[in-house]
Amino acid sequence: MSLLTLKGVRTNYGPIEALRGVDVEVNQGEIVTLIGANGAGKSTLLMTICGQPRPSAGTITYEGRVINDLPPHETAKLGIAQVPEGRRIFPRMTVFENLQLGATLADPQHFETDLAYCLDLFPILKQRRDQRAGTLSGGEQQMLAISRALMGRPRLLLLDEPSLGLAPLIIRRIFDVIADLNRTRGMTILLVEQNAYHALKLAHRAYVLQQGLVVMQGGGKELLANPEVRAAYLEGGAH
Amino acid sequence: MDGAVALGTFLQHLINGLTLGAIYGLIAIGYTMVYGIIRMINFAHGEIYMVGAFVAVTAFTLLAVLGITAVPLALVIVLLVAILFTAAYGWTVERIAYRPLRGAPKLAPLISAIGMSILLQNYVMLTQGARPKPLPPVLTGGITLWQGEGFSLGITYIQLFIILLTVALMTGFTLLITRTALGRAQRACEQDRTMAGLLGINVDRTISMTFVMGASLAAVAGVLVTMYYGVIDFYIGFLAGMKAFTAAVLGGIGSLPGAMLGGLLIGLIEAFFTGYVSGAYKDVAAFSILILVLVLRPTGLLGRPDIEKV
Ligand SMILES: Nc1ncnc2c1ncn2[C@@H]1O[C@H](COP(=O)(O)OP(=O)(O)O)[C@@H](O)[C@H]1O
Ligand SMILES: [Mg+2]
């Protein structure tokens, strides 16, 4: 069943056309990945789903409802959470406060359970609980950003380059968590990556975005085997 | 004996300065919070405080007409009424002067805030008259702390009330900002508005609430100053606003403890300058401080360097 459908979505920043008619579908329970070079429009796509910026054409349907005109705090209410590019944790607040903010829309009854779940997923955050988030390392910040999103109990999790700038060991941990969230919690995930190798290995389906257009799509393994994809996004074998 | 008188005089200036500083601090919080969340100086904030003072005079007069003269009851009613009305003005200013210009170049909301300030001044002048409005003393008397030859050190009940109420409000307000979901949402919007929205925080509403809170504290300052001086006019918002703004900059604009500290310092400087140098030039003293801070330490005493990089 389709959870999220984008049809002919266009997004502009003034005169710049970042998305030029994109069709993407994410089914319930899937991991879908979106790969593409820098500036292809990946982040714009995720942000457009969340409602900022708004698309100038096309339709975004979520759970059967057109959400084109909803602002971010409304799309969040529908259960769409984003771990944005650059993590965007609140640097001058504690780790705990960041997690509290993640639970803004959640039922307060679930707070302790969800907190325990996140701290279990990333035990390092337990030690950092009362530390200012800005003092965390890059990997810890990424773990915090993911946990913060999970505190809202999302039904659709959008991840924007979670591996960017992280050490290989931490990347592995993050991708393990993503796979696990999908497998054990049935969470639907739309994952944007430049680290195409890991993402494609993980994904049920994948799209390749180029200058604001989908130029290729297929199963994750299928694209991983595709010579064009290998040449363009896996040069030197990123594994 | 001379030394005792000198000390007594010093302490009297200190008490006067604390009282003034409390009032400036209450107003300064509004500047600093609004700056924190939208990175704009709300130049209409002084006028919001002035509106609070006028609501206070009107409310006190009405209560007297109605025969409600018990001081504690009258005070509570006046404070609540002033907060309610003034907060509505604060909310409206944001709606009219700022929200439509969100995302516009910085100069646009600046000009519209100055326009709002002129509008409010003239509106009050037209509806309330240009002549100073007196208020019969509400709270009289005081406590004599020390008495010597031809000299007495004392604190009036009004001064005591001003200082205690301000301490209580600032404590409550600090708790609100640091401990509650609303305060957390406000701080989140200060640090990353887009991210706050993605987490489900209604950013527009949070900004509105910030204006409402700043206006509420300014309203209390308006009530207190009306009781303290016993006379107000439509122009008091300008000078008090400038001084509270100076206080916010001195403390470090964007910083809540900074606004409180800055208010206190400006009040003390003014009182000591009046006492030891000259009352005629007390405003010059306050604004010289503003210029000095801007030149020597633009981030203020407790300000963060990163917040100034806008
Ligand atoms: N806020 C913005 N304002 C103007 N142009 C932008 C903005 N964000 C992105 N762009 C432009 O839109 C295009 C797509 O950017 P982006 O979505 O960030 O790509 P990706 O995430 O794939 O690297 C780029 O040309 C980029 O310069
Ligand atoms: Mg990007």
Image (cartoon, coloured by chain):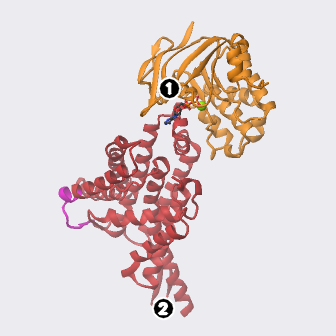
Chain colours: A orange, B red
Identity, as a three-letter code, of the amino acid under mark 1: Thr
Picture quarter containing residue A138? top right
Mark 2 within 8 Å of ligand 1, using the beta carbon: no
Mark 1 and mark 2 in contact? Answer it, CB < 8 Å.
no
**How far apart are the alpha carbons under marks 1 and 2?**
77 Å
Identity, as a three-letter code, of the amino acid under mark 2: Glu
| In this picture, residue B101 sits left or right of residue A95 | left
The numbered disc on residue A12 is none
* Mark 2 element type: loop
Query: Residue at horizontal 74%, vertical 31%?
Result: A119
Q: Position of residue A4 (x, y in %)?
A: 54, 14
Q: Position of residue A18 (x, y in %)?
A: 50, 28
Q: Position of residue A187 (x, y in %)?
A: 65, 16
Q: Image quadrant for the N terminus of chain B?
A: bottom right
Which segment is the magenta one?
Answer: B124-135
The numbered disc on residue A48 is 1
Residues beneath discs 1 and 2 located on the same chain: no
